[in-house]
Amino acid sequence: MKVFVTGTGGQLGFDVMNELARRGYEAVGSDITENADVKLDITDKNAVERAVSEIRPDAVIHCAAWTAVDAAEEEENIPKVKAVNAEGTKNIAAACKKIGCKMLYISTDYVFEGTGTEPWKPDCKDYAPLNVYGQTKLEGELAVSELLEKYFIVRIAWVFGRNGKNFVKTMLNVGRKYPEVRVVNDQVGTPTYTYDLARLLVDMVETEKYGYYHATNEGGYISWYEFAKEIYRLAGLNTKVVSVTTEEYGLSKAARPFNSRLDKSKLSESGFEPLPHWRDALKRFLEETGEI
């Protein structure tokens, strides 16, 4: 199997490439920078079509995205965010359709409005994104589902991995500089370790079990406050974590969902192995990055 991976400079794309290599598959990676097999701007429709037609993969795992949620709200950035997350994804989907290959698109809990306490089901269509990032990722979803039949749309949340910025790294940095940190306690979800997620994504493209899925680590639902406390506990830091509401925290330009609970039961129902417990994932991440 030959797999084309976009966004290999990011956390998830990096781990997907490594997982494909571990299994002995032919993997071709692309990114907008020079540090990839193929330098590709996914907003350039002709370049995307040319790259996919030349590589002729059996599957495309589309990880490339604009993920800076607050920066996406800035007026001058909105057209760029839409170009990457919506139009760029549409370009990838159109190229996949032309050669008849599978496509796996990485989406987000941000496509939902994030109220209540019920976990969002993968086939739920009650979309109401709260911010530009969520809206453009939803537009990407719709492009994939409208253009293709052989597609996987996998929504994830609270991502952390070795190759990039994330909440865990941020907490460790501020925890070493300051005696206490303020962390919100009213946004609830589950972390996702890209190393574990990459395994699942490759499992998926080995099949024809197409459709919408939700994927995070197991272990129930927690707040960012609880996550931060566990990060410091495992890292052996005595940083005090102060619990605050989103309103008390302030600062963010983009509205965040309070309810990021994702129902992952469809994974096991479809025969896929769920991801390990998030505490186990966090411990392995800290060990692998030399933090503990």
Image (cartoon, helix red, strand yellow):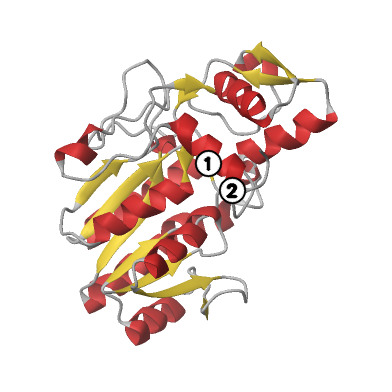
**Which of the numbered marks, if any, corresponds to residue 86?**
none
Residue 90 visible at all: no
Residue neighbourhood size for the residue with mark 1, other residues' Cα within 10 Å, grouped as few (<14), some (14–19), many (≥20): some
Report the side of 173 relative to 287 (left or right). right
Which residue is at the front of the view, 190 or 212?
190
Q: What residue lies at 16% left-to-right and 53% top-to-bottom? A: 209
The quadrant holding residue 69 is top right
How far is disc 2 from disc 1 in space, using C-alphas? 6 Å
Q: Is residue 185 positioned above or below 272 on the image?
A: above
Q: Position of residue 75 (x, y in %)?
A: 65, 47
Q: Quadrant of the C terminus?
A: top right
Please name the residue that numbered disc 2 is placed on. 288
Residue neighbourhood size for the residue with mark 2, other residues' Cα within 10 Å, grouped as few (<14), some (14–19), many (≥20): few
Which residue is at the front of the view, 85 or 56?
56
**Which of the numbered marks, if any, corresponds to residue 284?**
1
Q: Is residue 157 positioned above or below 230 on the image?
A: below
Q: Position of residue 196 (x, y in %)?
A: 41, 47
